[in-house]
């Protein structure tokens, strides 16, 4: 896809100033978040080449892809060196926690993503709590437990609703929120049996907001707030998922939300990490709850959120590469503040049958090109591959797109209003068919 083609919404940035440097970028990961990063970079006049690894079928239709395991630091660094890229962007958390950014930097290549030490903000909930306590960041009261006896005492101390978390990375499956003490205890025991610590938390009420900030370890630049929909079903019913949709901006959010989060959460956390000798450079994702007693951090992540990135980047009208390069090279102070479109963006995730418990893969997806061609609609791929599918209507040629994961697609709509963006996203969804698939019909409804 050419840079012109890559712009989903007809927003073309001005040409780069004469003599400015064009960069070549390698994006690591294979979800719709990475597809959004790739498309945003393709419409960035400061970028002259984008490559991805391992990508997915949709990413491969836009840019060259290489089959590299994201958690294999030596392989990622080797590919980056071989391609002579100027910057590596690491999308998912697992490679960050595994230290892939450290390996890439050790080869002398700029990398957007925190060190393994700093990624512990996401990799260990107990560590994140310790940092928040030291930095005075508002968050739920928590107890770290190493045994069932401690868990039982902790549950009684904190009371219902019970919030029980696996300390480590659990791909969205580590948290149980329940009124049922036996369910809470069973989850805690399963975590302990698997060798993890258990973090019990005070229950936080109120709406949740995701706020991302780009940082070079000293300077912090907030992006725009977004909200995601974690439950599988309409009306926030059903099991927790990786995220079924998102929208931005948040018309109902307090006007000083970004400023307050910068002052009480983002800057103090970045400062605390630097003081500890684990400077955090990359994307700091604050999951916030706006409770009746004020704003609290629910969790930190050490990377772009999925699907919020799809809507946040749809609204970015200035260079993403400049921000990420500034963060990766300690020069964020020299990068102009991001410019945001007044437009709204909504994304709806299309998930495979059985997601999140047992996704059915192999279904043939149709209608993608028609949806992507709609004005104000961008079809981003997550779990897709090309090839032959299963079932009676299996495709047989390599141009056929087939579901290969739980979250299959993230359809983004953009328009002047949230209602308009929502209409665009669902117009895109209506063109797409994947047998047995499901999506929420209430993303950004009534906002
Ligand atoms: P986490 O993986 O920590 O983001 O948790 C996943 C989801 O569980 C969050 O988005 C919340 O919806 C819910 N959750 C986590 N911690 C709490 C809490 N202390 N109180 C209420 N809900 C929570
Ligand atoms: N949207 C939730 C996450 O990225 O973890």
Image (tube, rainbow, N blue to C red):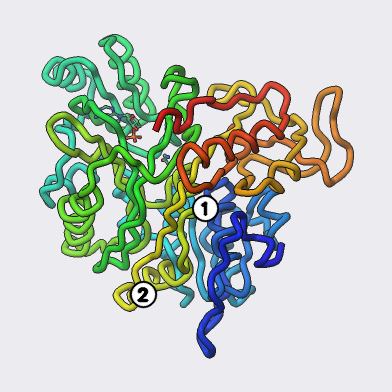
Find residue 307 and report its horizontal and vertical position in percent.
Answer: 48, 42
Q: Which residue is mark 2?
A: 335
Question: In the picture shown, does residue 211 fall above or below 274?
Answer: above
Q: Could you say which disc has been placed on residue 340 in the image?
A: none
**Residue at the right extreme, as displayed:** 396
Circle 2 residues within 10 Å: few <14, some 14–19, many ≥20: some
Q: Is mark 2 within 8 Å of ligand 2?
A: no
- What's the residue at 75%, 45% (across, down)? 369
Quick one: quadrant of the N terminus? Answer: bottom right
- What's the residue at 50%, 41% (across, down)? 346
Res 363 → quadrant: top right
Res 66 → quadrant: bottom right
- How many numbered callouts? 2
Q: Which residue is mark 1?
A: 71
- What's the residue at 41%, 28% (across, down)? 446
Tell me whether the residue at label 2 lies in contact with that at label 1, contact meaning CB atoms closer than 8 angstroms: no
Q: Kindly state the secondary structure of the residue where label 1 is placed.
A: loop
What's the distance in space between the residues labelled 2 and 1, CA to CA? Answer: 30 Å
Q: Kindly state the secondary structure of the residue where label 2 is placed.
A: loop
Q: In screen coordinates, is 372 left or right of 85?
A: right
- What's the residue at 29%, 75% (across, down)? 333
**Badge 2 or badge 1: first in the primary sequence:** 1
Find residue 208 and report its horizontal and vertical position in percent.
Answer: 31, 35
Q: State the residue in front, 312 or 330.
A: 312
**Quadrant assignment for ligand 2:** top left
Q: In screen coordinates, is 397 left or right of 143?
A: right
Regarding residue 117, the answer to whether it shows in the image is no
């Amino acid at each position: 896809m050419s840079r012109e083609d890559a712009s989903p919404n007809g927003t073309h940035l001005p040409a780069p100033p004469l003599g400015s440097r064009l960069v070549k970028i390698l994006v690591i990961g294979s979800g719709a978040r990475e597809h959004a990063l790739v498309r945003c970079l393709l419409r960035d006049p400061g970028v002259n080449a984008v490559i991805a690894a391992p990508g997915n079928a949709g990413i491969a239709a836009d840019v060259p892809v290489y089959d590299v395991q994201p958690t294999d630091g030596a392989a990622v660094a080797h590919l980056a060196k071989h391609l002579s890229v100027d910057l590596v962007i690491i999308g998912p958390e697992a490679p960050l926690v595994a230290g892939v950014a450290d390996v890439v930097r050790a080869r002398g290549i700029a990398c957007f993503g925190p060190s393994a030490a700093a990624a512990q903000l996401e990799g260990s909930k107990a560590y994140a709590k310790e940092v928040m306590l030291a930095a005075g960041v508002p968050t739920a009261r928590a107890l770290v437990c190493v045994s069932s006896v401690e868990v039982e005492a902790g549950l009684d101390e904190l009371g219902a609703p019970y919030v029980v978390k696996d300390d480590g990375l659990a791909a969205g499956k580590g948290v149980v929120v329940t009124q049922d003490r036996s369910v809470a205890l069973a989850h805690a025991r399963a975590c302990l049996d698997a060798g993890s610590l258990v973090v019990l938390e005070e229950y936080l009420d109120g709406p949740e907001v995701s706020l991302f900030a780009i940082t070079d370890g000293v300077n912090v630049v907030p992006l725009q707030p977004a909200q995601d929909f974690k439950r599988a079903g309409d009306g926030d019913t059903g099991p927790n998922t990786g995220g079924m949709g998102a929208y931005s901006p948040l018309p109902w959010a307090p006007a000083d939300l970004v400023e307050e989060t910068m002052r009480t959460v983002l800057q103090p956390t970045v400062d605390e990490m630097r003081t500890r000798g684990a400077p955090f450079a990359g994307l700091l994702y604050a999951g916030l709850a706006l409770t009746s007693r004020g704003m609290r951090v629910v969790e930190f992540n050490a990377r772009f959120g999925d699907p919020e990135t799809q809507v946040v980047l749809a609204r970015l009208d200035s260079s993403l590469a400049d921000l990420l390069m500034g963060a990766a090279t300690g020069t964020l102070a020299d990068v102009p503040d991001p410019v945001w479109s007044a437009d709204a963006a909504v994304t709806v995730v299309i998930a495979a049958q059985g997601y999140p418990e047992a996704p059915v893969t192999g279904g043939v997806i149709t209608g993608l090109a028609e949806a992507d061609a709609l004005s104000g609609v961008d079809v981003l791929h997550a779990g897709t591959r090309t090839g032959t599918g299963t079932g009676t209507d299996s495709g047989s040629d390599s141009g056929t797109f087939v579901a290969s994961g739980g979250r299959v697609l993230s359809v983004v709509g953009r328009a002047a209003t949230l209602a308009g963006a929502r209409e665009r996203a669902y117009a895109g969804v209506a063109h797409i068919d994947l047998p047995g698939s499901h999506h929420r019909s209430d993303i950004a409804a009534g906002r």
